[in-house]
Amino acid sequence: MNTTSDLKVVYFPSCINRSMGKNRFQDSDDLQLTELTHRLLLRAGFTIIYPESIDTHCCGMPFSSKGFAEANQEQSDALEKELLKASENGKYPVLYDMSPCFYHSKEEFSKTLKIVDPIEFMLDYVMPHLTVKNKKDTISVFPVCSVKKIGKIEQLLALSQLCANKVTMIDSNCCGFAGDRGFLIPELNEHGLRELKAQIPTNCTEGFSTSRTCEIGLEKMSGIDFKSIFYLIEEVTR
């Protein structure tokens, strides 16, 4: 990428972030994540391209995780076709706003598309075009399972440290929310995060991650505000 005028990105908002509301800690005037991401990208100088008929698309993971292989394949193939079209056959990067969705598409898609997970995109594409004006003092950050699988923990830490003076990386094998399992079997989430509160500094009131459903469980079990790291980036660079 060269000048700011050359910056173009295809933004694929995950179906979860398109459909789920804000958490209970957020102010009534806080933006939904998809709108916040749109404004953040514009402020960083990007031209945003959206796939057509976006509300009909899903990465397919909800079907795959329940064993509906055919439905997963149909959804994944349809999304890949639409993203190829929107990106002009891979000319422009495709931003995913949730790590699990990115990981699933990474496993399912061909190699023509340059799909980018939220951590890498913010660290390598967005932050160079923004200035951190008001760093947070203390935050907690949770690397979801897909972040561990794709080896992005160090990048997540680096991104977080650009935005806060003290970063606590939560250590947990899995939060136990596991897609929608946390809604159906909350005991999984409770067990997965049984040591969460003890890891959060007493003066820490905010946590960040890259998966909406995981954040719902993290918020419930920690008692502090947990949301997408995009909110953190937007706030400290505003």
Image (cartoon, rainbow, N blue to C red):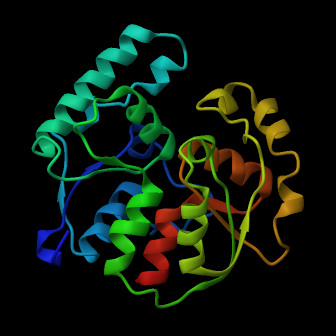
With 82 as the anchor, is 156 left or right in this view?
right
Could one spot residue 53 in this view of the protein?
no
> Residue at horizontal 53%, vertical 44%?
150
**Is residue 141 placed above or below 191 in the rendered structure?**
below
Quadrant in which the C terminus is drawn: bottom left
With 102 as the anchor, is 87 left or right in this view?
left
> Residue at horizontal 63%, vertical 63%?
25
- Tell me where residue 59 appears, x and y as whole percent: 37, 31
> Residue at horizontal 43%, vertical 74%?
234
- Tell me where residue 83 appears, x and y as whole percent: 20, 38
With 24 as the anchor, is 41 left or right in this view?
left
**Is residue 150 placed above or below 33 in the rendered structure?**
above
Task: Give the number of marks.
Answer: 0
Depth check: give the residue in front, 108 or 54: 108
Quadrant in which the N terminus is drawn: bottom left
> Residue at horizontal 34%, vertical 16%?
73
Residue 126 appears in which quarter of the rendering?
Answer: bottom left
Depth check: give the residue in front, 46 or 112: 112
- Tell me where residue 66 appears, x and y as whole percent: 55, 15
**Is residue 103 placed above or below 226 in the rendered structure?**
above
With 106 as the anchor, is 94 left or right in this view?
left
Could one spot residue 193 in this view of the protein?
yes
Depth check: give the residue in front, 68 or 53: 68
- Tell me where residue 195 appears, x and y as whole percent: 88, 50
